[in-house]
Image: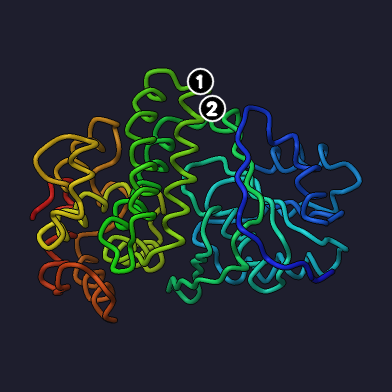
Amino acid sequence: MLQATQSRREAEARFGAGVRHDVAKAVRDLGASSALILSTPAQSESAFEMASDLGEMASGVFAKAIMHTPVEVTEAAIAHLDELSADCLVAIGGGSTIGLGKAIAYRTDLPQVAIPTTYAGSEATPILGQTQHGLKTTLSDPKVTPEIVLYDPELVRTLPIPMTVTSALNAMAHAAEAFYAPNRNSETDAEAQRGFEAFARGLPRVLRAPDDLDARLETQRGAWACGRVLGQVGMALHHKLCHTLGGSFDLPHAETHAIVLPHAIAYNARSAEKELQPIVDILGGDSAGGAMHDFAKRMGAPLALRDLGLQEADLDKAAELATKAPYPNPHPITKSGIRKLLQAAWAGEAPAF
């Protein structure tokens, strides 16, 4: 395995229908010549399509990425990488695959090309979430950010509507928490607003016409903006809760974000009403949490954690885990408050605050 030696640079996004077929140029632009292609088992066909586009520049395919980036899968991928002469990574897929690429890059410093097939936005951030022994932890390091991202609306044109909606709400969560981050500034506020507006405009259009490439491209631009802002400011309650629920109870990532988001925003709006006003301005309604809940409902998003398999008996443990370690948040974190939030999210009710 070759170690990357070039210096890191600002992530670059390239947008357009068919841009995924420019993957060989992207690899060359990294100064690389041999790529390991990553995917989930379900997207292995797309990985082999990328291998065909790369030709002799494809050193192999590792199609075993799974949700929440388990450390043991990363270690298996690196063992496979050690058998090859790859000098870069190409990850095609959603957050699971892109997370695996970032986890490998963290350990090897290899450069990456990310080709997203969802809207999660992980490809735009220096943040890596990993799961080991039933716990999900996160870290931030510039070397995990993919150097080049290829946003091809043709890859999301057939993304099922339920997955489109939950993935979009996952991305919007980054912008929502950016509005009240303690280290926010005018630039991050503007980026968050751009991302939120792109989804507010584009997602209803996608629901009306799923194969509308212009609408799909607008939502991809939203994903890029929301992902970029996630990498610039600190996240708080919403992301803490979702990592707890995903890592400790194995709930699906995007669906969990979609359900929890209105409740976390309503919880924090009690101390950050002014900061969250852009959500009301963009989505309408009387409150940020209510606006998020109504938007999610209109988009047909899942609303109840119980529908994801979480047991009501698990809510006490989830509240305890989510409040175990202190972290910055605009509204004080209390176990009783988080338990009340989780109850409403579990039952699929409107936000309790």
Q: Residue furthest right?
A: 56
| Quadrant location, the N terminus | bottom right
Q: Is residue 205 above or below residue 325?
A: above
| Quadrant location, the C terminus | bottom left
Q: Residue at label 2?
A: 158
Side (left or right) of 73 relative to 174: right
Nearer to me, 51 or 45:
51
Q: Which amino acid is tagged 1?
A: Asp
Nearer to me, 239 or 177:
177
Residue found at x 49% / y 70%: 131
Q: Residue furthest front?
A: 186
Residue found at x 52% / y 66%: 128
Side (left or right) of 241 relative to 345: right
Side (left or right) of 301 relative to 23: left
Q: Residue at label 1?
A: 211
Nearer to me, 245 or 285:
285
Q: Which amino acid is tagged 2?
A: Thr
- Secondary structure beneath dot 2 equals loop
Task: Tell me where residue 342 sits by quadrant.
Answer: bottom left
Side (left or right) of 118 relative to 56: left
Image coordinates of residue 210 in percent, x first then y, are 46, 22
